[in-house]
Image (cartoon, rainbow, N blue to C red):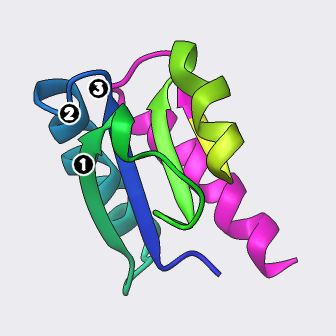
Amino acid sequence: MINKILCFCGSGLGTSFVMEMNVKKALKNLGITGVQVEHSTIDDVMPGAADLFVCSADLLPNAQKAGKAIGLKNMVAVNEIQEKLKEVFEAEQA
């Protein structure tokens, strides 16, 4: 079950914060509630830090070492985030 999502980038500042806002927007659009969303730096990506990691496609291998992850081609595209989150949450319920 996904209770916590960690959005991260190299520095943990601008990009990860924008991803956090867009993940929250996508979850709302999907009607998914009760999920904690935070942003951070790549240094905080480790097993157990979150149930799902969200990052840019180039950082995906780092995230996959820590657990379930999705990589984004366009980190500010709510549509892409929403589509990938929907797939992950549907798979969780299967």
Instruction: Give me the disc on residue 12.
Output: 2
Callout 2: SS: loop
Residue 76: percent from left, percent from top? 29, 26
Query: Where the N terminus falls, by quadrant?
Result: bottom right
Name the front one of labels 2 and 3.
Answer: 2
Mark 3 neighbour class, 10 Å CA radius: few under 14, some 14 to 19, many 20 or more:
some
Q: Tell me if label 1 and label 2 are in contact, CB under 8 Å.
A: yes
Q: Tell me if label 2 and label 3 are in contact, CB under 8 Å.
A: no
Residue topped by disc 1: 39
Give the extent of the magenta segment.
Answer: 71-94
Horizontal side of 22 relative to 27 (left or right) equals left
Instruction: Give me the disc on residue 17.
Output: none
Give the dominant element type of the magenta stretch: helix, strand or loop.
helix
At 34% from the left and 51% from the top, the residue drawn is: 23
Horizontal side of 40 relative to 85 (left or right) equals left
Query: Where the C terminus falls, by quadrant?
Result: bottom right
Residue 86: percent from left, percent from top? 61, 57
**Mark 1 vs mark 2, CA separation in Å:** 7 Å
Instruction: Give me the disc on residue 76.
Output: 3
Residue 17, magenta (yes or no): no
Choose the circle earlier in sequence order: 2 or 3: 2
Residue 13: percent from left, percent from top? 12, 31
